[in-house]
Amino acid sequence: MIIQAFSLGCAALLLFAAPVEEKIEARVNDAILTTGDLDRILAPLFSQYDLSMRGPELALRMEQTRAAAIESWIENQLILQEAQSLEGFQLDPMEVERMFEEERGRFESTEEFDRVLALEGITEREFKKTLEERYKVRALTYQKVTGLISISPRRVMEYYREHESDYREDEMARISLILIPSGETTAKREADRELAESLLAELEAGADFADLARLHSAGPRAEEGGDFGLITKGDWKTQLDEAAFRLEVGEYSGLIEADEGYYILYCSGKKEASLKPLEEVYEEIEDNLFRQEYERRFRAWIEDLRSRAHVVAGE
């Protein structure tokens, strides 16, 4: 929310920024961004920072955010001034009013909304002007960029074929595990091994793996019968991983001795390596292509606007 974020940001600004001399931070034709203006933009952004950040990490983060905020202001000004220069580009008062009511509706009451405006030194008219500018930027961006983008099914299919490796799923196995930890003394280690071997014998005699895991396993998910669900090759350390993927469905491993104890694995299911069907990833690909095309068109449009304007950053 615009106003609440700004409120939080004011406090953060006192923590993050030392007093600085007022100057012009950027200019787009006759429009200027002052240090005070920039501080107000940065306040809600700085309020999200982790207060534990210090020194070079904080300084770098702040500088990156500051540069991005200036560039964003320049781009917005270029779009706003383009909107003002275009014949036929009209503001939709009803949409601005809807946006205003939506912002006001986030508060418990109209009085609370008015109180926050007053605390920030913003009049209702000034706040509506901010919403008008936001509307103009969105509307003209849609007219010049977003609304011109169409991603055809053929383009999605071509991308899918060219990037099949991105949509391949590795072989998976559903594995359950029993762990009998090994003791520190030789006698304890021998006793632990005997227990693990006795469990293996019970399994071979027809005992239920999950029941034995609940009773004896010290491993993770013992209460769930040692069931880890589907795992992918490489999820576990090499010794266990190799043993798990050698198993056929319904098969137990022998004892697997590791530093921490003795393992017994059980495979209850497998999923072969496969290629995700196009239908499953169609929207993901379409969205990805849309974002790429949007960024390309938007950058080109901004560069064109910039070439026809007087733009200065950091006077």
Image: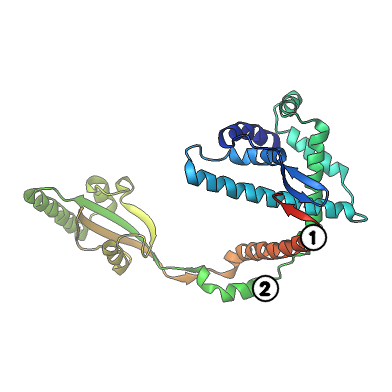
Residue 139 visible in the picture: no
176 to 40, vertically: above or below: below
- Amino acid type of disc 2? Arg
User: Residue 121 vs residue 237: left or right?
Assistant: right
- Secondary structure at badge 1 equals helix
Could you classify mark 1 by the number of other residues whose Cα lies within 10 Å: few (under 14), some (14-19), or many (20 or more)?
A: some
Expressed as whole percent of the image width and height from the top left, the position of residue 126 reads 81, 35
Q: Residue at x 76, y 55 (%)?
A: 311
User: Residue 70 vs residue 53: left or right?
Assistant: right
- Amino acid type of disc 1? Leu
Q: Residue at x 82, y 42 (%)?
A: 96
Q: Nearer the viewer, mark 2 or mark 1?
A: 1
- The residue where tag 2 is placed is 155
Q: Alpha-carbon distance for marks 2 and 1? A: 29 Å
Q: Nearer the viewer, residue 268 or 140?
A: 140
Q: Nearer the viewer, residue 264 or 232?
A: 232
**Residue lying farthest right?**
87
281 to 132, vertically: above or below: below
Q: Which mark is residue 1?
A: none
Could you classify mark 2 by the number of other residues whose Cα lies within 10 Å: few (under 14), some (14-19), or many (20 or more)?
A: few
